[in-house]
Image: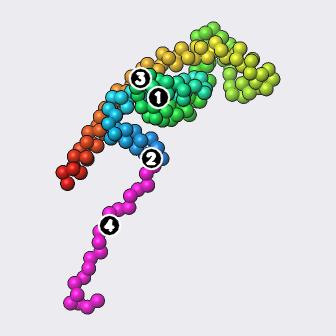
């Protein structure tokens, strides 16, 4: 390069985009897309709150059907409800035994279920069959469902009010971004 030629400056490239996390791609983006498509922040917050509560029901195998039925009955977004419900699976499994123990206590069967563990349930199934488990746990399950129903009301309320304000803020930002794009 001769001194008479103008020196070219390197072009400033934007920084590479950071890879989006699983949480962002699979949870947040779908919820924000629902806001962008016109679902109100209030309906989305209610959907997620109810989905979280249904996801904690202390009865295995009914969360999908229960959440779909509630979403359809209340005219909420079924996909968002299923997403919230299934995100609670790990918590549901972690809370199952404590719910059953507490349910047994309030139903007067605390001594039989006081030392209940997964290994104890496996042994009971192996030696006495599923009928023995059913006889042992039906009252505990009823008590656990009563406790879950009572705990779900404040859970839904808290999740609703917290997420409603978050979703309103996100909706405002999305609306501002859209209006900036239309002006430019």
Of pointers 2 and 1, the one earlier in the residue sequence? 2
Of pointers 3 and 4, the one earlier in the residue sequence? 4
Residue drawn at point x = 60 percent, y = 27 percent? 61
Q: Which label belongs to residue 25?
A: 2
- In the rendered structure, does residue 9 fall within the stretch colored magenta? yes
The mark tally for this picture is 4
> Where is mark 3, residue-wise?
74
Marks 1 and 4 in Cβ contact (< 8 Å):
no
- In the rendered structure, does residue 14 fall within the stretch colored magenta? yes
Residue drawn at point x = 58 percent, y = 25 percent? 62
| Helix, strand or loop for disc 2 | helix
> Where is mark 1, residue-wise?
51
Splitting the image into 4 quarters, where does residue 153 fall? top left
Splitting the image into 4 quarters, where does residue 41 fall? top left
> Which of the two residues, 2 or 30, is positioned nearer the viewer here?
30
- Quadrant occupied by the N terminus: bottom left
Residue 50 percent location from the top left of the image: 44, 25
Q: Residues within 10 Å of mark 3 (few under 14, many from 20)?
A: few
Q: Residues within 10 Å of mark 1 (few under 14, many from 20)?
A: many
């Amino acid at each position: 390069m001769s001194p008479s030629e103008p020196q070219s400056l390197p072009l400033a490239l934007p920084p590479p985009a950071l890879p989006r996390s699983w949480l962002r791609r699979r949870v947040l983006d779908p919820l924000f897309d629902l806001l962008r498509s016109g679902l109100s922040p209030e309906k989305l917050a209610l959907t997620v709150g109810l989905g979280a509560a249904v996801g904690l029901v202390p009865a295995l195998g009914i969360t999908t059907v229960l959440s779909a039925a509630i979403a359809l009955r209340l005219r909420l977004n079924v996909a968002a409800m299923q997403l919230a419900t299934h995100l609670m699976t790990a918590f549901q499994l972690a809370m199952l035994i404590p719910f059953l123990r507490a349910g047994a206590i309030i139903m007067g069967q605390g001594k039989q279920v006081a030392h209940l563990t997964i290994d104890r349930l496996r042994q009971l199934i192996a030696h006495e069959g599923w009928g023995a488990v059913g006889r042992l746990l039906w009252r505990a399950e009823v008590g656990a469902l009563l406790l879950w129903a009572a705990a779900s009301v404040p859970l839904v309320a808290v999740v609703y009010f917290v997420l409603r304000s978050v979703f309103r803020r996100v909706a405002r930002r999305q609306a501002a971004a859209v209006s900036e794009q239309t002006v430019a």
